[in-house]
Amino acid sequence: MDKRQFLLGAAAAAFATPVLAQTPPAKADIPRDWIDPDTGHRIVRLSEEDGSKSLYFHDNAFTADGKWLVFDSPSGIQMVELATRKLRHLTPAGYGTLMVSRTKNICYARKYPGGVIKTADDAGRAGIEIVAIDMTTGKIRTIAKDIKGYVTSVNADDTLLAGTWAEREYQLQPGPKVGGTDGGYNAIGPDGKPLSFQAAKEVRMAERLKQNIPMEIFTLDIKTGERKVVTASTDWLNHVQFSPADPHRLMYCHEGPWHGVDRIWTIKTDGTGKENVHKRAMNMEIAGHEFFAYDGNRILYDLQTPRGEDFWLASYDLTTHKRVWYHLQRNEWSVHFQVTRDGTLFAGDGGDADMVARAPDGKWMYLFTPEIIEDLGVSAPDAADLVRPGVLRATKLVNLSKHAYTTEPNLQFTPDGKWLVFRSNMHGPIHVYAVEVAKA
């Protein structure tokens, strides 16, 4: 992967962004900088506007030089200088970040028709444009519009977009959206009463999977606009992401309730090399929320054997095909996991008692130190072909007891590994925060 760095400009005057309305301030009682009394780690609020959100956990949010973080807000895409926490508006309202280029000073984004951001579940995707924003000058350039499908990722050398297309839309979250959450899953149980957020999500996902809607994963050439189908299915194809290093490798999932699908797959952009990364060995075993390590060599994912009982962070090496499974305690299970760019530390964003782990005390942000369980001097004859076991040693970073997991924290390490960025509603409105990995 080309790791060339770039400079964003020596002065603030380089940011020729449009003149925007003043950003509405956050509620006065939301702290800006404090030490978590339960963990001893420093937390800072990076956003100023209620309703601001950091990016999804595997969508790159950082410039290649590691100086700037991009996040979404109601008034447009914003960027924050990590060293100073100074904010810059990158776009007006109506734009939502796709991801930041890994090698260039470009933010890829969606421009929504009428300036109104639609969620990924909303119908009416027609009219969405994909744009490239020069983060030095603020110039916005349309690179794709009238797209047959929904773009979700950009490859490692900035030549291809990737996304999914479905023959028809399906409303996964029907009805009104719930403020302070990621949406609003709702469904009625057998007793005629509304289900909890998590139970409703499971029901709605099962219903979507049963639709057998014809779908495609496709690529779009950024320069020519050429559209190519990578693979097609009546399975629910989702979670499409490019490798951070290989511009022609995609990972995607067969979406649905995890105990009913073989979820994690990789494929080349020419349609060859399709591989199921994890095949279950027991009934009710689940694997998911997959993501690439920064070097693109490993795929990591949440593994439970069986669901809700035994918890692992699993890794699969795409070159050697070796597997490592790191064990976690119930309270340490997390909605999403992350890894530092050098691969030495992991993190997790915890979960509440209504989620799959049913953790009685799981509402924490965790730092994990991996530890391999070594052989006791004598190895099994086929040890090299077996899963290598390990354990994650947990350190608590943030007390999230006041966070409602109807908003997923979606944590990301900063490029230097010194902070974890996340979104939270722990003070009411959703904001973007960062916690320092080293104890204050």
Image (spheres, grey):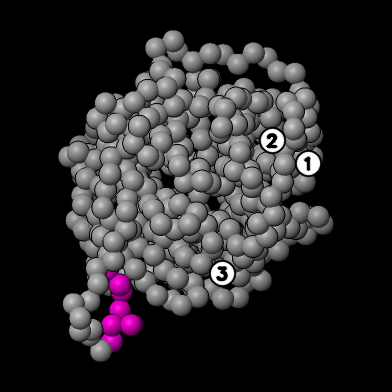
Question: 1 and 316: which one is in front?
Answer: 1
Please identify the quadrant where the N terminus is shown.
bottom right
Q: Amino acid at mark 1?
A: Thr
Please identify the quadrant where the C terminus is shown.
top left
Q: Position of residue 188 (x, y in %)?
A: 29, 36
The reply to whether the C-beta atoms of the residues labelled 1 and 2 are less than 8 Å apart is yes
Secondary structure type for disc 2: strand
Q: Earlier along the polypeptide chain: callout 1 or callout 3? A: 1
Cα–Cα span, label 1 and label 2: 9 Å
Residue that mark 2 sits on: 111
* Residue 288 relative to residue 145: left or right: left
Instruction: Relative to 213, say whether 65 is above or below.
Output: above
Whether residue 286 is in magenta: the answer is no
Residue that mark 1 sits on: 142
Cα–Cα span, label 2 and label 3: 28 Å
Q: Amino acid at mark 3?
A: Ile
Secondary structure type for disc 3: strand
* Residue 347 relative to residue 285: left or right: right
Instruction: Relative to 309, say whether 129 is above or below.
Output: above
Q: Position of residue 404 (x, y in %)?
A: 33, 30
Instruction: Relative to 224, say whether 413 is above or below.
Output: above
Q: Range of the magenta residues?
A: 382-389
Q: Earlier along the polypeptide chain: callout 1 or callout 2? A: 2
Residue that mark 3 sits on: 267
Cα–Cα span, label 1 and label 3: 28 Å
Mark 1 closeness class: few <14, some 14–19, many ≥20 residues within 10 Å = some
Q: Position of residue 367 (x, y in %)?
A: 33, 46
Query: Which residue is most to the right?
Result: 224
The residue that appears at 55% across and 27% down in the rendered structure is 85
